[in-house]
Amino acid sequence: MCFLQSTFFFDWVSLLSISNEDAKEIQTVIRIIFVLFSIRFILNVIEIVLAAKQVPALNNLFNLSSNIVALVAIFILTKMTKGNLIYLSIAYCSAPILILSLSSYFLYSGRLSKIKPEFGLIDFKKIKSLARIGGQFFIIQVAYLVIFSTDNLIIIKILGPVDVTSYNLALRYFSLPIVLFTIVVTPFWSACTEAYIIQDYEWIKKSIKKLLVFWSLLFILIICLLINSNRFYQFWVGERIQIYYLLSMIMALYAILSTWNNLFVYFINGIGKIRLQVIISIIGMVLNIPLSIYLAKYQNLGNVGVILGTCICLCFGSILFPLQSIKILNHNDSGIWQK
């Protein structure tokens, strides 16, 4: 409710460089998105359960199904309406709610019936410990949301919509290795939890070594993507949008750092020793926006400076997360390393 009320007080005209008429529509759209996102947040429990059961393929199927439903809904809107942003936001955000609702009903009625949530089964004694670690994960998620989701706002405010387009095209291009790595590493989270509980450290070490080999192959792929980036942009968008090679270089660095961090973060998250990650994410959240603005505006780096600011924030974890993982696996973690 506090967020919904606060949307009335934001200066959307200045923030997004839009007209007063558009600002009213944006207010409505943001409130719709927030409400639907909150509903989806609750329904996402089924995805966490499936991840814990080590069947992430079903989660990927949910995402695919949601995208298909959203695509069909948007196609219908193009035929029946005249470009309405409110209808578009409802169609796009309602699709995953529909899929997750149906999936929850059928799964809890079938293969997951033994772990179907029931109020009578709640153990209130465990709420404090769950809230403590859940609160830390929430802080991390908010911090990452600020770090990774504010770039477009910064660019459109400082540089304009043209630079947003070139930025997002380069980001989509170099997101391929990130998506590939995420697909491979996702089951590692819950598997690490199980292995750590039964103290099967050798399995964890072998799995990390295999992931390091896969990351090395992705590193080569990223370099190949960088070398061929201009050719691909030419084929993709032609001469209409200019994407500087320096932007592609920093995007490649972003893909390298992001996948490298995730390799160790999934292990650390799986065993629940996330205090260091909370501190690093808060530091990154505080630094990211002013650093990106400074590099983009005052160092005249444009949209390159925005993604460079994100990369600098990721560098803290790139050093400390592997170090923490090594300490944990060698049983010499203490202090902040073991919390």
Image: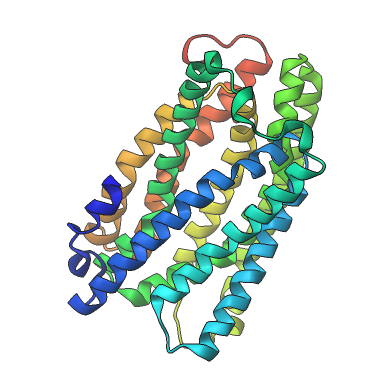
- Point 34% across, 60% down: residue: 31
Q: Is residue 294 visible?
A: no
- Point 31% across, 67% down: residue: 28
Q: Is residue 229 visible?
A: yes
Which of the 4 quarters of the picture holds residue 52? top right
Question: How is the rendered protein coloured?
Answer: rainbow
- Residue 75: percent from left, percent from top: 58, 83
- Residue 261: percent from left, percent from top: 57, 39
Q: Is residue 314 above or below residue 200?
A: below
Of residues 245 and 58, the one drawn nearer to the viewer in this rendering: 58
The answer to whether residue 207 is left or right of residue 222 is right
The answer to whether residue 52 is left or right of residue 286 is right
Which of the 4 quarters of the picture holds residue 198? top right
Q: Is residue 266 above or below residue 306?
A: above
- Residue 42: percent from left, percent from top: 53, 44
- Residue 69: percent from left, percent from top: 64, 70
The answer to whether residue 101 is left or right of residue 8 is right
* Numbered label tally: 0
Of residues 108 and 136, the one drawn nearer to the viewer in this rendering: 108
